[in-house]
Image: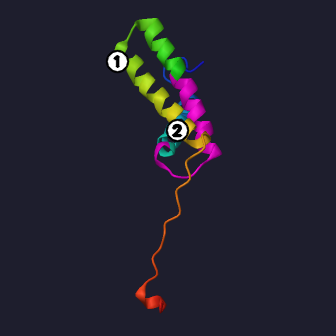
Amino acid sequence: MFTNNTGAMDRMSIFYTGLIFLVVLTFFGLSVWGLFNKGRSVLVAGAGVVVLLGAALGVLHAWGEGRSIPWTVIYAVIAVIGLVATLRQVLPRKKQPAAKTEPSAADGN
């Protein structure tokens, strides 16, 4: 499917592989951005859910198939990033108390 008669990858499979890589990188980037931004975004929450689910499958595969502790830990860290990014977008935040301002001398009071 991905190789021609000579065993080399054809152009369409390279295109799709690159496209999948860009989509995964974009979702992961949105999740990392969701850890630090102060606003809320449905797009970031959705990307966090996708990253969480994909990384959870990675954890199961890395541990179940090869008992690979390094890859299991890497996928677990990525899953936590997705979870925290999603929770930061969904959970309510504490309201900041309004800052009290002192009248300045330039106000004429």
Query: Residue 106 placed where, x, y %?
Result: 44, 90
Query: Residue 100 placed where, x, y %?
Result: 49, 69
Left or right, 41 with respect to 64, comes to right
In the figure, residue 44 lies in which quadrant?
top right
**Residue that numbered label 2 is attached to:** 85
Query: Residue 6 placed where, x, y %?
Result: 50, 18
The residue lying at 47 percent from left, 17 percent from top is 59
The residue lying at 47 percent from left, 29 percent from top is 80
**Residue that numbered label 1 is attached to:** 70
Seen as rendered, the residue at the extreme bottom is 108
Query: Residue 19 placed where, x, y %?
Result: 56, 36
Q: Is residue 39 magenta?
A: yes
Judge whether 2 appears above or below 16 on screen: above
Q: Is residue 38 magenta?
A: yes
Closer to the eye: label 2 or 1: 2
Q: Nearer the viewer, residue 62 or 107?
A: 107
Q: Which stretch appears magenta? A: 35-55
The residue lying at 48 percent from left, 45 percent from top is 33
> Could you tell me if residue 11 is visible in this image?
no
Q: Secondary structure at mark 1?
A: helix
Tell me the amino acid under the disc marked 2.
Ala
Q: Secondary structure at mark 2?
A: helix
Q: Nearer the viewer, residue 15 or 27?
A: 27
